Image (cartoon, rainbow, N blue to C red):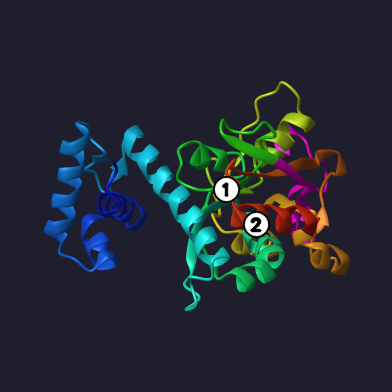
Amino acid sequence: MLDNIYLEALAAVIEEGGFDKAALKLNISQSAVSQRIRNFEEQLGRVLVVRSTPPEPTEDGRKLIKHLRTIRLMEKELSDSMRLNPSGEFVTLPVGVNADSLATWFLDALDSFLKEHNVLLDLYVDDENRTHEMLRRGEVVGCIGTVAKPVKGCRSDFLATFDYLCLSSPDFYQRWFSDGFDRETVAEAPAAVFNRKDETQSQMLEKVFPGQSVTHPIFYVPSSESFVDVVCRGLAYGMVPEFQVQQELDSGRLVEILPQGRVPVSLYWHSWNVETQLLDGLRRELVKYF
């Protein structure tokens, strides 16, 4: 039988990123948190936490945290159905989301749902091609990602397909690409890239220069809002979702460098295959938004 006191201590250490922060959350001493983790590991006969900075769960630790999060969802649903939660206590759902979605449509899609159900989100932001890894590790209960195939033990729902456009300011275009978008000009012109996991720029280059190796200066901008700002300022060109910059395109503040370089990105909602009203409601709100 698993002791919830131990499970909560384990989850707090990982979710809060340290034993000291877990102690504050649980309102106990740091030594008490450490003792609970040690007792839990001795009881189960295996290591649950890698004592790094921040602490990381082992594979067994991840399974136990996922188990606790499932229990939390089930208890919330039972409590609401039996009206045992008159104080309107919030439940927190860890969710993985890509930065572009978070900066644009994601909260609009969930606004009514979050207010109606007293749900708080613990958002984990990563590249849309990587968020499913957090779901596979049990760190989140659902995620927005580009992988269509469901993760084992999860379900997948198609949301929408967005075109990422190769854009720049008019001045930047005249300076770097007035004579054409070829390997020579690309090798000299700075390109904005979200981070080192971002594959959109390389996907565009592969479409335009198939099978060819192309290197270029990179301006890393790990923020969707600042990414657009960098491109609008003429500091670099970059791949931006069309819906995010429609106003800038209509006004002429941004121009599309080459339509043939568009990269379509399909997004999917992945979530645990657990039958709860909260998870199902979250899924329905995201799917119907499009």
How many marks do you count on the picture? Answer: 2
Amino acid under disc 1: Gly
Secondary structure beneath dot 2 equals helix
Residue closer to the observer: 35 or 258:
35
Q: Is residue 174 magenta?
A: yes
- Point out residue 148 in the picture as x, y percentages from the top left corner: 70, 34
**Mark seen at residue 205:** none
Q: Quadrant of residue 244?
A: bottom right
- Point out residue 97 in the picture as x, y percentages from the top left corner: 59, 52
Q: Residue at x 59, y 37 (%)?
A: 154
Q: Which residue is mark 2?
A: 282
Amino acid under disc 2: Leu
180 left or right, relative to 37: right
Q: Residue at x 65, y 25 (%)?
A: 213
**Measured Cα–Cα span from mark 2 to mark 1:** 9 Å
Q: Which residue is mark 1?
A: 142
- Point out residue 225 in the picture as x, y percentages from the top left corner: 62, 64
Q: Residue at x 56, y 43 (%)?
A: 131
Residue closer to the observer: 186 or 146:
146
- Farthest residue to the front: give it: 82
- Seen in the picture, residue 63 relative to 76 is either above or below; the reply is above
**Residue 243 in sight in this render:** yes
Q: Residue at x 62, y 56 (%)?
A: 277
Q: Is residue 261 magenta?
A: no
- Seen in the picture, residue 197 relative to 286 is either above or below; the reply is above
- Point out residue 214 in the picture as x, y percentages from the top left corner: 65, 30
Q: Which quarter of the rendered picture does the N terminus lie within?
A: top left
Marked residue nearer the N-terminal end (2 or 1): 1
Q: Which residues are magenta?
A: 157-185
The reply to whether callout 2 and callout 1 are in contact (CB within 8 Å) is yes
